[in-house]
Image (tube, grey):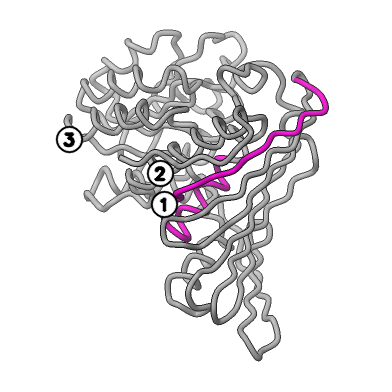
Amino acid sequence: MINAAVIGLGRWGKNIVESVQGKSQRLRFIRGVSKEPELVRDFAAAKGFELSTEFEQAVADPGVQAVFLATPHSLHVRQISAVAAAGKPVWCEKPLALTRSEAERAVAVCAKAGVPFALGNNKRCFSSMRELKRVVADGSIGEVLHIEGNFTNEHSTRVKGGWRDDPNESPGGGMTGAGLHLIDAFVNLAGPIAKVDARLFAQKAPPDPRDAAAALVEFAGGATGVLATVRAAPMYWRIMVFGTKGWAEARDETTLTVAKIGEQPNTHVFPAVDSLGVLLEAFGETIETGKPFPVSTADMLDVVGTFEAIVRSMAQGGPLSVKRG
């Protein structure tokens, strides 16, 4: 069993704990760090872990074998570096960073220290998305020509304050929150993105924002794509891949429809899973066995590079090439 510390116990930090504690055969949390301990003291007690306010103290604890970061992105590189220097595996929630150069620093310090590094792109682990990846990878719908994606959620109306309302922490409207999952889905399915042309349409600034973010993309391999996210609308997830032999569409967490040329569309509903729990378990396996983490560091960097280009494109109002390492 890997004894871990979680840094940051806001909404998502609590979700990480909930997905592991008392359920995992590989991971358990023995420490938590919060700058507002009075708000999470009952939660820590119910989950059976020690609560403190100091990041450095948790990292230095000899009983802590891995560290999970659910903190604002502006702290990530420094915190990742500190955990890596202590020789401990580190999980980081997205966004890893807002620029590729910062993301490269984070990945490099972990590689130099020889510690496993993971990023919380849990939407890859939706049942529908894992099956969509299989369908695309095995050539069932032929060569990928185009991808469409939309991830919209109402969190901006329910999760107030913090990094989501700060344009320095959360540029590009909904692209920093929901949009990053779309970029990750695109990179996972069709490889690196070479060019973007993005726009942000804002009807109301935070708090309780109303905006739509959209981007046209061109993949390095020649395929194209379009992605969009709307803040404050009800939850909606859709990724659709068009190929030379057919198309496949993932809707919500469990539904996949595949249509091949000359055949009727076939829809299948897969069992629901805890997508975050699946990815956390995969990281535990990486720590224990050395098995590669499902999200490669190359994908992590390509996602951040694409995000950086999208935000710059929004600001400049025109197409941009994506920086590559």
Q: Earlier in the sequence, mark 1 or mark 2?
A: 1
Mark 1 neighbour class, 10 Å CA radius: few under 14, some 14 to 19, many 20 or more: many
Q: CA distance from mark 1 to mark 3?
A: 25 Å
Q: Judge depth for marks 1 and 3 and give the one in front.
A: 1
Q: Determine contact: label 1, label 2, CB under 8 Å.
A: yes
Q: Earlier in the sequence, mark 3 or mark 2?
A: 3
Residue lying furthest right in this view? 203
**Helix or strand or loop: what does disc 3 sit on?**
loop
Type of amino acid under label 2: Asp
Check disc 3 and report the residue beneath it: 114
Type of amino acid under label 3: Gly
Of residue 39 and residue 74, the one placed in the foreground of this image is: 74
Q: Which mark is residue 53?
A: none
Q: Which mark is residue 302?
A: 2
Type of amino acid under label 1: Pro
Magenta stretch, residue numbers: 180-205
Residue at 45% across / 8% down in the picture?
53
Q: Determine contact: label 1, label 3, CB under 8 Å.
A: no
